[in-house]
Amino acid sequence: MNAVIETHQLHKHFGNIRAINGLDLQVGQGEIYGLLGPNGSGKTTLIRLITGLLHPTDGRIIVLGQPMPHKGVLAQIGYMTQASALYEDLTIRENVAFFAAMCGGVSRQRVNEVIALVDLTDRANSLVRTLSGGMKQRASLACALVHSPRLLLLDEPTVGVDPQLRATFWAYFRRLADEGTTLIISSHAMDEAERCDRLGFIRRGKLLAEGTAVSLRQQSNTPTIEAAFLHFATMEQTENPSQGEANA
């Protein structure tokens, strides 16, 4: 595998809370990797470690061949946060153009393309503070995509998005992967798991299991991804009954 992301015995502790607890992960180029787990399982903390926004307590993380944090890698990463990171008093177009300018070398045409992709062309000149939650989610995605990153990190990207637009998003994610972009998509929506190339079930800051949706169902002898997750979570709970949940 031509690895874009590698973690080796990665730990991140917040006091007594082990948000990430000895996690080993490898994600290849052009792969859509789904991080599935409940709220508080460590998904967002892991994504922040990958971006270099957090420093690990212990272990190593390598992104695009460089140990993180690494300033030179940041321009090649697109990150859509779970909470809106937009400027409320700017329009959608101004927000997307600002992120494009921060990265450099992005054309006005590309700004218009990503606004159209998230179906916000008619609202491009609206102030962000006037938008619904779902529209803000879509605008955030446009900002993450505008500079055509090699690695795209999406934290719950389809929350508040209607089913038709969600299908459009996933078709675009697949096209990006086919063109060589690597995507990490965190979610607690099990129905999206089938769209990923590989899945990592995460709980208490650990990978419970990893593989394709088909292989995980087979390993657990269960009919659905949700049932497979519960199977592996029950196994982990039995083996480590005293450890508290991560709070991240």
Image (cartoon, rainbow, N blue to C red):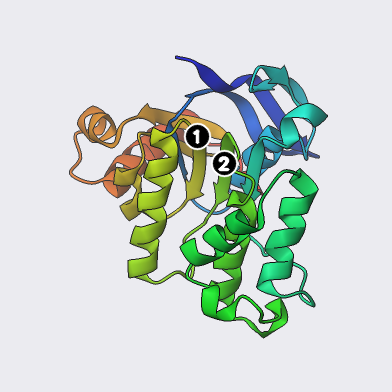
Q: Position of residue 199 (x, y in %)?
A: 39, 35
- Position of residue 193 relative to residue 49, above or below, is below
- Percent across and percent down for residue 246 are 63, 44
Q: Pick the residue in front: 40 or 80.
A: 80
Q: How many marks?
A: 2
The crowd level at tag 1 (other Cα within 10 Å; few <14, some 14-19, many 20+) is many
In the rendered structure, the answer to whether residue 84 lies left or right of residue 110 reads right
User: Residue 203: in sight, yes or no?
Assistant: yes
Which residue matches tag 1?
Answer: 181
Which residue is painted at 18% across and 44% down in the image? Answer: 223
Q: Which mark is residue 152?
A: 2
Q: Name the image quarter holding the N terminus.
A: top left
Q: Residue at x 58, y 35 (%)?
A: 151
The amino acid on which the numbered mark 1 sits, given as a three-letter code, is Thr
- Percent across and percent down for residue 46 are 63, 37
Task: Give, as a three-letter code, the residue at label 2.
Answer: Leu
**Residue 12 to residue 164: above or below:** above
